[in-house]
Image (cartoon, grey):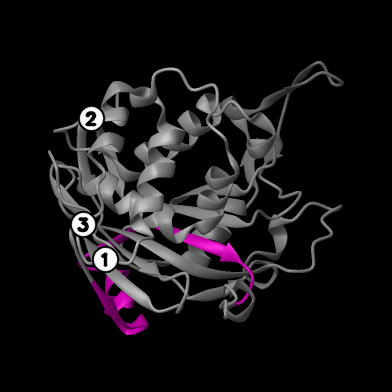
Amino acid sequence: MRGLSNHQLSCCVNTLLQTFSATWELGDILDKWEAAAVGEESCNIPLQLKRVLSAMRKDTSRPAPHHAFLHSLDLNRIRLGMQHDADEVFLSILNLLQHQMDDKHLTLNTYLLSLPLHVKEDHDSLEGCMTSFFEHQELRGINCCFCAKCEKKTPSKKGVKLLSLPRILSVHLKRFRNSNGYTRKLDCRITFPETFDFAETVKEAFSSDFNQNDCKYTLHAVVVHSGYASSGHYTAYVRHRGNQCWYYADDSHVHQVSWKEVQRSYGGITAYMLMYRRGSKEEVQQPQLSG
């Protein structure tokens, strides 16, 4: 695996690039895309991302060149030399990919679901956060909704139901709280599994016509934030596509680690985003080529 040098506070983008590299489905889509109608190359996020992900796959210990990608983000108002929120930049890059790719059928289907999960201030778990997210909320009093049939505001319930499960599940652990213009970070312990079954974890999340059988997910990337709300540093734990081992990426420094090391991000250095892939460990492992 190749590291990425820190250029004008680029640790946030460096971490997301490692996460994108571990999410090989994105690279596969970009490899199929022919950038024939691209005008100004320096502004085109899909083209620059395609190039940097390709460079990151090359077998060399030197940091991958990514200044052109950083420059393209800057031209698209994701500024260099500034502190950024990883989840906001992540979603911004995905939106820019969808808008700037001229081959729309490649991005027609939804491969990813992003879950913004509220975090308790003392101790929590991924399973607990997901259960709270999918619980129905009762709306009463001033929160009642207008019923067209009754022609008046009536008590009701609101909630989220899943029609299907995506290939990639992105989880945003909302560790930052904003109150009276002041933002603080929650460093509380949040546990998460290496694999989990959606159907067993959150049974009430599915709609009545949900008919998928495979609901198992395997973790392949963890975006980690250390520091405070006003200043900090991003790093990542990522699972290698080939050998399925875990690696820790801190800008240009990358080394292999164990699952026990990944679990350090439960608290202290804190997990901020989790990336899961549908399928068990054995199913998601890429076949080795021979000959």
Query: What is the CA distance from the residue labelled 3 to the residue labelled 2?
Result: 42 Å
As drawn, is 197 to the left or to the right of 244? right
Circle nearer the N terminus (1, 2): 1
Q: Residue at x 41, y 27 (%)?
A: 44
Using the rendered image of the protein, determine whether residue 131 is visible from the camera's viewpoint.
Answer: yes
Few, some or many residues within 10 Å of mark 2 (<14, 14–19, 20+): few
Counting from the top left corner in percent of width and height, residue 102 is at: 59, 25
Q: Residue at x 14, y 42 (%)?
A: 7
Depth check, mark 3 against mark 2: the one in front is: 3
Q: Residue at x 62, y 76 (%)?
A: 280
Kindly state the secondary structure of the residue where label 2 is placed: loop
Quarter containing the C terminus: bottom right
Quarter containing the N terminus: bottom left
Three-letter code for the amino acid on which mark 1 is drawn = Thr
Query: What is the CA distance from the residue labelled 3 to the residue labelled 1?
Result: 8 Å
Few, some or many residues within 10 Å of mark 1 (<14, 14–19, 20+): few
Three-letter code for the amino acid on which mark 3 is drawn = Pro
* Res 251 → quadrant: bottom left
Q: Is residue 256 magenta?
A: yes
Kindly state the secondary structure of the residue where label 1 is placed: loop
Circle nearer the N terminus (3, 2): 3
Counting from the top left corner in percent of width and height, residue 74 is at: 26, 26
Q: Which residue matches tag 2?
A: 180
As drawn, is 42 to the left or to the right of 97? left
Asked whether disc 1 touches disc 2, contact meaning CB atoms under 8 Å apart, the reply is: no
What residue span does the magenta drawing correspond to? 255-280
Depth check, mark 3 against mark 1: the one in front is: 1
Q: Which residue matches tag 3?
A: 63
Depth check, mark 1 against mark 2: the one in front is: 1
Q: Which residue matches tag 1?
A: 60
